[in-house]
Image: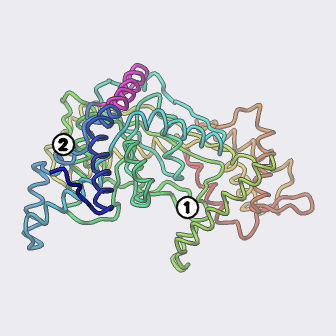
C-alpha cells in the first residue's frame, strides 16, 4: 500500500495546472470580481451625481441576460419562424443564427472603462490633435430635459474622430451608446468599443432576420432610456455636404412610441466641423469608382507613415495641431410634444404613412443640424478664395484674401452660424490657416498672390461645402 506510483511528467503538469485553476476559481477570482465590482459601483455612484442623464439599469444588466432576452423576443421569434420556412431550414439553425446576431449587436457596457479610461483617452487624443471648441445653443433646455426621457444626439458625420470628440464632450450629460459599422470589428478594438457601450451594425445587410434582431435591440434600448448617438447620414460625408438621411434607426425607435407614455424620446441635433479631416483624401478617393481599391496593407502602411512623420515632428518640437475641431449642440426636440401638436400617433399608421411622418421629423432635424455646423476657420478661408476665383479674379493678395475671409465670417455670423474663432483672434487664425494650406500644397503663392492649386480643387471644395447655414452658403 505504501509503494510509490510513477506517473508521466505531462500528467503531473496537467494536475498542477488543474489544481491551480481550481484554486484561483474558488479563492482568487471571487475576490477580484468583488474588488472590480466595488470600483465600478463607486464610479457609477459618482458620475450619476453629476450627469444630467443618468446611466440606466439596462446598461448594468449582464450581457448574457440581454442576449437571451433579445434572442427570445416575441417579434424575433416570429421573424425566426418565417425565415426558417422561407429558407427551408430547421428552426434550430435559424435560432443559432439569431443568437449569433444578438451576440454581435449587444454591447458590454462598463462604467469604469467608459468614464475612467475611455473618457481620459478621448480627451487627451482630441486635445492633442485639435483645438477643441464646444458650444451649447440652448443649455437651459438641455439641462431641463425630463430625467426619464430617452435622449438621442443626432449629428452630421465628418470624420471617425466624431466618436471621440462627442463622447468626451457629452460626458457631462451622459454615457453615449453609438451604432458602429463593421470596420471596427477587429481585435482588440471591438472589445473596447463594446465596453464603451457601443453596438455593431451591418449597415448594408438586407437579411430580414438580422434587421429584425437589430430593430428589437434598438427598441429595447430606447424603451429603457439608454442615451444614444446617431449619424442619420449612415456614413461619412464624401463631398463635405450633408447627405440624405436614412430612416431605419429612427423607424426602430419611433414605430412603437406612445405619445402619452411615461418615457419621452428627445432628439438633440448636433453639428460638427474641423479645420482638417484626417480621412479627407481617402473620402474623396472613394467617390471615383474608376480608381482601384487600395489594399489593406497599403492603408496600414500609409497610416503608420502618417503617424511616424507626425511623431518625428513632435520630437523635434515642430509639430502643430490640425487647427480647430468644433461641436455645436442644438436645442432639444421632444417627440411627445411634436406628436401632441399634430395629433399624431405613429403606432396607428401603416408602414408607408409612418415612414412619411418619420421622414418629416428627420428632415426637420437635418435642417437644424445644417444650421448648427460650426464655421471653422479653414473652410471659411477656402470658400472665400474659391468664390473670388469663380468671380474671375486671378488669385488674391494676402490683404485681399484676409479681407474676404473677414467679410465671409461676418456674413456667416449674420446668418446665425456658430463662428468657432472669436473676433480678436481672427488675424492670427487667418495666418495659421494660410500656413496650413501652404504646407498641404492646397494653395500656391506667386507674384504676391495666392491661388488654389489645380490638383487640390476637389479637396478645397470638400472643405468649403461644410459651411451649411440657414439661408444658403
Q: Is residue 277 left or right of residue 343?
A: right
Eyeballing the image, is 8 above or below 379?
below
Question: x, y percentage for residue 281?
Answer: 62, 64
* Residue 94 vertical position relative to residue 469 in the rendered view, above or below: below
Q: Tag on residue 256?
A: 2
Q: Which mark is residue 334?
A: none
Disc 1 on helix, strand or loop? loop
Residue 228 in view in this figure: yes
The magenta-colored residue range is: 34-56
- In depth, the one of 23 and 83 nearer the eye is 23
Q: Nearer the viewer, residue 378 or 407?
A: 378
**Quarter of the image where one finds residue 306:** bottom right
Residue drawn at point x = 9 percent, y = 49 percent: 74
Q: Which residue is mark 1?
A: 239
Tell me whether circle 2 and circle 1 mark residues in contact (CB < 8 Å): no
Residue at the extreme right of the image, as rendered: 447
Confirm whether the magenta stretch covers residue 449: no
Q: Is residue 191 above or below residue 286?
A: above
Q: What kind of element bears circle 2?
A: loop
Overall secondary structure of the magenta stretch? helix
Residue 47 shown in magenta = yes
Q: Residue 255: give x, y in percent of width and height.
A: 21, 45
The residue nearer to you, when weighing 87 against 244, is 87
Front residue of this view, candidates 287 and 220: 220
Residue occupying image coordinates x 55% and y 72%: 297
How far apart are labels 2 and 1 at the CA level? 35 Å
The percent position of residue 40, horizontal first and vertical second, equals: 38, 30
Amino acid at each position: 500500500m505504501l509503494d510509490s506510483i510513477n506517473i508521466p511528467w505531462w500528467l503531473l503538469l496537467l494536475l498542477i495546472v488543474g489544481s491551480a485553476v481550481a484554486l484561483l476559481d474558488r479563492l482568487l477570482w471571487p475576490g477580484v470580481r468583488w474588488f472590480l465590482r466595488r470600483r465600478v459601483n463607486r464610479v457609477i455612484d459618482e458620475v450619476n451625481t453629476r450627469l444630467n442623464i443618468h446611466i440606466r439599469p439596462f446598461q448594468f444588466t449582464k450581457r448574457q441576460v440581454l442576449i437571451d432576452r433579445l434572442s427570445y423576443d416575441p417579434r424575433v421569434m416570429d421573424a425566426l419562424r418565417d425565415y426558417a420556412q422561407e429558407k427551408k431550414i430547421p428552426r434550430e439553425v435559424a435560432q443559432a443564427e439569431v443568437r449569433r446576431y444578438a451576440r454581435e449587436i449587444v454591447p458590454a457596457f462598463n462604467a469604469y472603462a467608459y468614464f475612467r479610461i475611455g473618457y481620459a483617452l478621448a480627451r487627451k487624443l482630441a486635445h492633442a490633435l485639435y483645438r477643441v471648441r464646444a458650444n451649447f445653443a440652448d443649455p437651459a433646455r438641455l439641462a431641463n430635459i425630463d430625467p426619464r426621457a430617452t435622449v438621442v444626439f443626432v449629428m452630421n458625420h465628418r470624420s471617425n474622430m466624431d466618436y471621440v470628440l462627442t463622447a468626451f464632450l457629452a460626458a457631462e450629460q451622459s454615457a453615449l451608446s453609438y451604432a458602429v459599422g463593421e470596420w471596427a470589428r477587429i481585435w482588440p478594438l471591438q472589445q473596447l468599443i463594446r465596453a464603451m457601450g457601443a453596438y455593431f451594425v451591418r449597415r448594408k445587410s438586407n437579411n430580414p432576420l438580422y434587421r429584425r434582431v437589430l430593430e428589437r435591440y434598438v427598441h429595447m434600448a430606447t424603451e429603457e432610456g439608454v442615451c444614444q448617438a446617431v449619424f442619420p447620414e449612415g456614413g461619412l460625408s464624401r463631398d463635405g455636404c450633408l447627405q440624405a438621411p436614412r430612416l431605419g434607426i429612427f423607424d426602430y425607435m419611433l414605430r412603437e412610441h406612445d405619445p402619452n407614455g411615461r418615457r419621452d424620446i428627445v432628439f438633440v441635433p448636433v453639428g460638427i466641423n474641423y479645420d482638417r479631416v484626417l480621412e479627407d483624401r481617402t473620402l474623396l478617393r472613394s467617390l471615383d469608382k474608376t480608381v482601384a481599391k487600395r489594399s489593406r496593407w497599403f492603408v496600414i502602411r500609409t497610416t503608420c507613415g502618417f503617424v511616424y512623420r507626425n511623431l518625428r515632428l513632435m520630437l523635434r518640437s515642430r509639430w502643430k495641431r490640425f487647427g480647430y475641431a468644433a461641436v455645436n449642440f442644438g436645442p432639444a426636440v421632444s417627440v411627445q410634444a411634436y406628436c401632441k401638436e399634430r395629433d399624431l400617433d405613429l403606432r396607428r399608421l401603416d408602414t408607408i404613412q409612418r415612414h412619411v411622418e418619420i421622414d418629416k421629423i428627420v428632415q426637420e432635424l437635418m435642417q437644424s443640424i445644417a444650421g448648427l455646423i460650426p464655421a471653422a476657420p479653414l473652410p471659411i478661408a477656402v470658400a472665400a478664395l474659391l468664390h473670388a476665383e469663380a468671380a474671375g479674379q486671378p488669385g488674391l493678395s494676402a490683404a485681399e484674401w484676409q479681407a474676404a475671409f473677414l467679410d465671409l465670417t461676418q456674413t456667416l455670423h449674420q446668418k446665425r452660424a456658430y463662428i468657432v474663432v472669436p473676433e480678436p483672434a481672427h488675424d492670427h487664425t487667418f495666418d495659421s490657416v494660410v500656413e496650413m494650406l501652404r504646407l498641404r500644397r492646397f494653395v500656391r503663392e506667386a507674384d504676391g498672390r495666392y491661388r488654389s492649386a489645380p490638383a487640390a480643387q476637389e479637396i478645397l471644395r470638400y472643405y468649403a461645402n461644410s459651411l451649411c447655414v440657414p439661408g444658403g452658403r
